[in-house]
């Protein structure tokens, strides 16, 4: 038999759990190295992915990528939708999962991706956020 304390501890685990991930594709070269030493990222493209690490399929969700572009001196916001996603699967992002540069971004503020979803049909909305402050590297 499960008591109330155990049930409330298990309840958050019994739903969808969408988690954003970012891949930051940067330019490389001498100029870009100088920018990096000065605290900037010279970004070619930004890709967002969403993974459902929960125990249930998710309903549709919404998300956004946000950052300040020094090159154009403006805040950039790109919104996206995530189709319902099975448990332990990557979500399908619409209309696209990328934002095309070039952008120059301060490392200390980075790039933020967030996704808002409902873990179960009866639960309130939840937002997961990630901030990336470095270029992604293939190993």
Image (cartoon, rainbow, N blue to C red):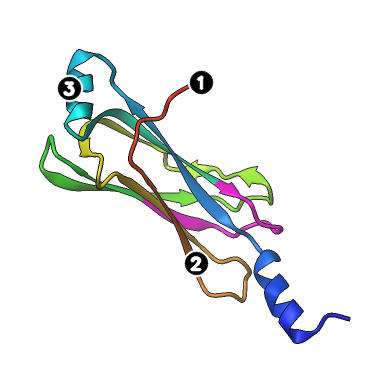
Q: Give the residue number, with chain letter if any, for mark 2.
A: 126
Magenta stretch: give its range. Answer: 51-64
Which residue is drawn at the image coordinates 63% and 69% (left, top)? Answer: 120
Quick check: is 52 in the magenta stretch? yes
Foreground mark, 1 or 2, reads 1
- For residue 1, side relative to residue 101 (left or right): right
Q: Position of residue 134 (x, y in %)?
A: 34, 35
Quick check: is 60 in the magenta stretch? yes
* Helix, strand or loop at mark 2: strand
Q: Give the residue number, with chain letter if any, for mark 1.
A: 139
Label annotation for residue 34: 3
Which residue is drawn at the image coordinates 66% and 56% (left, top)? Answer: 54
Q: Is residue 112 above or below residue 11?
A: above
* Helix, strand or loop at mark 3: helix
The one nearer the camera, 37 or 124, is 37
Give neighbour class at mark 2: few <14, some 14-19, many 20+ (Cα, 10 Å).
few
Q: In this figure, what is the number of numbered marks?
A: 3
Which residue is drawn at the image coordinates 43% and 25% (left, top)? Answer: 137
First reached walking from the N terminus: tag 2 or tag 3: 3
The one nearer the camera, 112 or 6, is 6
């Amino acid at each position: 038999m499960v008591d109330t304390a155990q049930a409330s501890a298990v309840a958050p685990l019994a739903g969808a759990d969408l988690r954003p991930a970012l891949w930051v594709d940067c330019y490389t070269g001498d100029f870009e190295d100088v920018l990096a030493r000065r605290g900037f990222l010279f970004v070619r493209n930004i890709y967002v992915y969403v993974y459902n690490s929960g125990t249930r399929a998710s309903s549709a969700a919404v998300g956004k990528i946000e950052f300040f572009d020094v090159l154009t001196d403006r805040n950039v916001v790109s919104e996206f939708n995530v189709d319902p996603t099975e448990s332990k699967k990557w979500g399908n992002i619409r209309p696209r999962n990328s934002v095309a540069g070039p952008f120059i971004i301060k490392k200390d503020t980075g790039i933020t991706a967030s996704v808002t979803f409902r873990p179960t049909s009866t639960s309130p909305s939840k937002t997961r956020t990630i901030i990336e402050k470095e270029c992604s590297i293939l190993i």
